[in-house]
Amino acid sequence: MRRVVVIGAGAAGCMATIFAAAGGAETTLLERTLDGGRKILISGGGRCNVLPARLDESRFVTDSSPNTLRKLVRAWPLPEQIAFFEHELGLRLVEEEKSAKLFPATNRARDVRDGLLALAARRGARLVTGTRVTGIAPAGPLWRVACEGAPALEADAVVVATGGLSVPNTGSDGAGLHWLERLGHALNPTYAALTPITAKPAPFAALAGISLRVSLSARGAGRAAEATGGFLFTHRGYSGPAVLDVSHVLVRARLEGADPAARLLVRWTPHGDEAWQALLQPRGTRAVATVLRAELPDRLAAALLELARVDPARSLADLTRDERRRLIDALVRCELPWTGDEGYRKAEVTGGGVALAEIDPRTMESRRQPGLFLCGEVLDAFGPIGGYNFYWAWATGRAAGQGAARQAAT
C-alpha cells in the first residue's frame, strides 16, 4: 500500500486525511499540537460556523486567476458538502437565519472537530499529535518528512495543510509557507485578513460596546470592498463581521504605503440620502435628536450630531440647509478614521499565499514538485465571514486527499 502524509490537523488537513484514506492510501496525519483542529474549536464563538447557507463565489478574494479560483470553489458544491456533514459525519446542520450561516444542531464546535478525526480513524488513518514537522524534501521518487525529536517519515505523497499565520496561539506559524517557498513555489504577499481595524487615538472610544448593523465600504490602492452586517465599536477601533470583511483593503493599503491611505466609509442605517431628507423635514417643534434616536443607539446619535456640528436640541424647522447636509453626510457616508489593524493575532485568516497557478486545480498537486499537494490557508484565497473559509478548506482538502491517494497508487 502506498503512503500519504498529511501535515496539519486543521479543517483542510482533516478533510484531506479522510479522503486520502478513503482512496486506499496508508495515511498518516501529523499535528504539532496535542489535539488538532483548534481553529475549528474557537470558530463561531465555540459553535463552529461549518458552512454558509448560500454561497456567492464572487466574494472570495485572491490575487491569482479568478478562473482557477472558480474551478476550486465549484469542485465540491455546497449541497454536496452539506450532505457530507449530515450523512458521513452524522452532524445535522441548522441555519441561523439572521446570518445565513450553518451550525451543527448541537451548537458545539467540538462535535465537528471530533467527528472529522473519528471519521478519518474509521477510514484507517493514523493521527500523530504533538509532532512538529521541521521540513519536507523530495527523496528520489518519495518524499521525506523531517520531524523534531522523532525519525523522519517517507511517503509517496505529502499534503501540506499547515494553515497560514492567523491566530498563532492555535499553532499556526507559517512554517508550511516557508517550506513551499524554499521548494520553488511563487507566493503572493501574505497579510492579515478578516481582522479588526484600529484608530490611534480612537475617536469613538466612548462608544465601545455599541453594536449595530451597518453598510461599509473600503477603497484605496486600487482595491475596493463593500459589506453589510454587524459592526462593533471597540476601545481600540472597530470590529464586527462587516469590518472584518472589508479590512483587507485597509491592511494592504497600509502595508504598501498607499498615499492617500484607503478610506473607510459607513452608512449607519438602511436609509440613504432621500430617506433621511424626508425624516428630517420640519414636523412642528420636534427636535433633530429625537429623529436620530428613533433610528440609532442614543450614544451614537449624540456622537453623530456632535460630528456634524448640530445642536441636539435644535428643532427640525430650524435646521439650516448646511446643517442638514452635514448631518446626512454623517449618517450616510461617515468617514471612520483609522491608523492600523489588529494583525494576525486576531485575524480570521491569512490573505495571500501560494499562487493558484502553482497547483493543478483538479488534484491540488504542485506543478513544481510532483507528489506534493497543497490545500487550505496556504493557498492565495479567502472568503468573507460566514463559513466561506471552512468551505474553502473542505473543498481544497478533499481534492488534495483524493489527488494524493491517486498519486500514491501510481
Image (tube, rainbow, N blue to C red):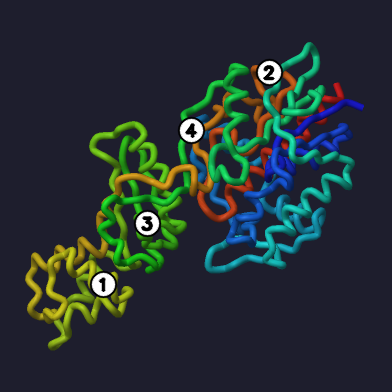
Q: Mark 2 belongs to which amino acid?
A: Gln
Residue 13: horizontal and vertical position, in percent? 71, 40
Q: Residue 140, can we see it?
A: yes
Which marked residue is nearer to the observer: mark 1 or mark 3?
A: 3
Residue 49: horizontal and vertical position, in percent? 62, 57
User: Pointer 2: residues within 10 angstroms few (<14), some, or many (20+)?
Assistant: some
> Distance between the Cα atoms at labels 3 and 2?
42 Å
Residue at 59% of width from left, 18% of height from top? 182
Q: Which mark is residue 238?
A: 3
Q: Which is more N-terminal, label 2 or label 4?
A: 4
**Circle 4 sits on which residue?**
190
Q: Mark 1 belongs to which amino acid?
A: Ala
Which marked residue is nearer to the observer: mark 4 or mark 2?
A: 4
Q: Mark 4 belongs to which amino acid?
A: Thr
User: Pointer 4: residues within 10 angstroms few (<14), some, or many (20+)?
Assistant: some
- Asked whether disc 3 touches disc 4, contact meaning CB atoms under 8 Å apart, the reply is no
> Distance between the Cα atoms at labels 3 and 4?
22 Å
Q: Nearer the viewer, residue 227 or 273?
A: 227
Left or right? Give the position of 387 relative to 137: left
> Distance between the Cα atoms at labels 1 and 3?
17 Å
**Circle 2 sits on which residue?**
369
The secondary element bearing badge 1 is classed as helix
Residue at 68% of width from left, 59% of height from top? 109
Residue at 36% of width from left, 34% of height from top? 255
Is residue 403 shown above or below 80? above
- Asked whether disc 3 touches disc 2, contact meaning CB atoms under 8 Å apart, the reply is no
**Circle 1 sits on which residue?**
301
Q: Which is more N-terminal, label 1 or label 4?
A: 4
The secondary element bearing badge 3 is classed as strand
Q: Which is more N-terminal, label 1 or label 2?
A: 1
- Asked whether disc 1 touches disc 3, contact meaning CB atoms under 8 Å apart, the reply is no
Left or right? Give the position of 402 relative to 45: right
